[in-house]
Amino acid sequence: MSYLEENLRILKKTRPKLARLVEEAPPLPADRLAPTKTGGVTALVDLPDGKRLLLASKYQPEEEAKRLLEGYEMGPTSTYFVLGMGMGYHVAELQRRRKPETRLVVLEADPSIFRTALANCDFAGMLSSEQVHILVGDRIAELFAELRNFVFEIFSSPIVVVPHRPSIAAARDFYRRAHHDLTEFVQGGSLTVKTALILSRASFHNRFANIVPYLSSVGVRVLYGRHRGLPGIVVSAGPSLYRNIDRLKDLEGRAVLFAVSTALKPLLARGIRPTYSVLLDFHDVSRRYFDRIDPAVAAKIPLVCDSKAAPAAVAAYDGPLVIGDDTFLDAVFKELQIQKGPLPPGSTVAHTAFHLAHICGCDPVVFVGQDLAYSYHVTHVPGTAIFNQWLPELNRFQTLDMKEWENIVRLKGALVKVKSVDGKELYTDEQMLSYRKDFELLISLGDRTYIDATEGGAYIEGTQVMPLSEVIERYAGPVRPELLDPGLPRLAPEDRREIFKGALEALELRTKEMDEMSRLYRDAIDILGRIENRIERGERVNKMIRKVHDIRTRCREFGHIYHVISNLAIADNIHRQVEDRRIRSEKLTGREKQREQTRRDLEYVRALSRGLDYLKELALEIRPEIEREAGDAAEGTVSEGRPEAGDGRAPG
């Protein structure tokens, strides 16, 4: 069986779509192929200037491949991005050197070149590995969408880029775009991991502090398809909102207006009432988004919020709440069988509003005020909370313009130029660049019409650029009463009472289970410590390892709690995964392997124990609230005076 036949046989099993692409690709013409002195082939490719270039040496292509990889440290858990397949010699050499846990990402512009490489080298091991990702052709966005599933594994270890110069010279535009997208992926992925590590405990604190509104509010599932076929306007607070904010009055009641929390007060100040507002912000300063909003107005604008949103902001809003499900709270209160419906997480509140527009069935989805850049050299539309925060600092020596300039200059090292909606250039920063990329990925995977009616800011690939006046003319329908007052279902007092009684019972069960888990973890830490000492002394540890396995079996009874605390200890979880990969890649055996595994397990169990202690603290903090709410419900009252909403049946 030839190399091509064997490689295709494996591809059909592991990557059928890629196999079809290879089979359909025409072979390189014979006059462009040349034999090498070592029995392989090389190929001539045309350059933009009319010259031709060999993709590999005619004489010693294998040695050339080794020289290409000189200086690249082969880390056991690293991720290698190879820009250009060429004739495959350098990829085959990299495959030969890679450890089992090394991740390999190969990008090739030309399907015919990729086919020729498969006919030239044996890639059986590479093509059958789950640690290998391959992109052939121009669908770069699909590759990085796939890699997002492995963001923690990729960014917990070194990333190495291996450029194949001849391939890049032959398809410069493709590889320039690939490198650009790779840079954005690295920036965005690093930010995702850092944010998860930094905000892990803060997000859990917010979840539990929001337990009363979470249990008593309506779930996102009541919005599924609620506004199918109507235009959805995602209103953000970018600088360009100032140009169009008054025109949004023409859409009130005629389209579904999703106002991000920062844009709500500027809209209300102009007498524009959105259909929904959306909250994601973790920080308590976000309560200012809702200061001094008339309760009668708020009562007709549901606030759709993430369960991790700042408790102070959630409490400050006087209108009805809509909350998406939270797997961690649902695990703690699993007996309630909460089914709120998912609200997909977003990098920003605007991404959450974008997801909400899809949940509601809106089409088209229209962006307004979504600059994702420093349009007019400012950060937000005037009237947002940040401007009010600056007011005490303003004087004749410190103006709003100066505050904006300071805000931008602080990010000087991260500023980059991007294409604007009018084809010119303007500045953005790495963070907003990452947010734009997220939108572009979501749009590429979406099935709606996407329109950018911001009339300013960065160009978002996949959108139609259109003035808001044209959007109104083409898509706005007649006024619909349900868009002026969504009238969500409310939770009956007797249902509320049952919910909080059930929540109290669930919390009592979890407290007993957590006490038992604490005892098991203490025992495991003690035994693992003694195992570590015995291994150092060369003594047998088999019986003690069986005891650890028995404890692990017992802990599996509490999988719902482990689900929570393993995410509380996310940094340690990532470290454990890295250690797992390192131990496997180094192929340790005997006592050396036992020593490393024991050290890894001891560190991780200690981290889980700390996470469990924190979870117990959170449970202790919310218990009085749940007791009070259960008592209030029994007496027919509702604390805080919030208009409670529900689906009339369950806490979702």
Image (tube, helix red, strand yellow):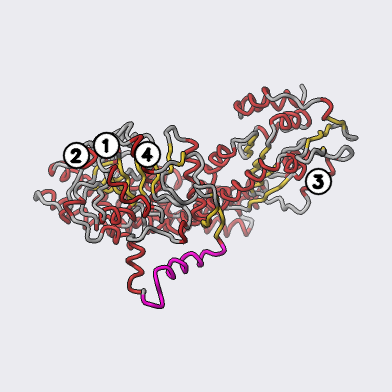
CA–CA distance in space, label 3 to label 2: 67 Å
Q: Which residue is mark 4?
A: 471
Q: Nearer the viewer, mark 3 or mark 2?
A: 2
Secondary structure of the residue carrying tag 4 is: helix
- Residue found at the very far left of the displayed protein: 635
* Horizontal and vertical percent position of residue 595: 61, 54
Residue type at mark 2: give it.
Pro
Q: Earlier in the sequence, mark 4 or mark 1?
A: 1
Circles 1 and 2, Cβ within 8 Å, touching? The answer is: yes
Q: Nearer the viewer, mark 4 or mark 3?
A: 4
* Horizontal and vertical percent position of residue 326: 34, 45
Q: Looking at the image, is 418 positioned above or below residue 121?
A: below
Q: Name the side, left or right, on which 190 lies relative to 64.
A: left
- Please identify the quarter of the rendering in which residue 34 is found: top right
Residue type at mark 3: give it.
Lys
- Which region of the structure is painted magenta? 395-413
Q: Residue at x 27, y 37 (%)?
A: 222
- Please identify the quarter of the rendering in which residue 479 is found: top left
- Residue 500 lies in magenta, yes or no? no
Q: Nearer the viewer, residue 337 or 508?
A: 337
CA–CA distance in space, label 4 to label 1: 27 Å
Q: Earlier in the sequence, mark 2 or mark 4?
A: 4
Q: Which residue is mark 1?
A: 222
Residue type at mark 1: give it.
Val
CA–CA distance in space, label 2 to label 4: 31 Å
Q: Nearer the viewer, residue 400 or 199?
A: 400
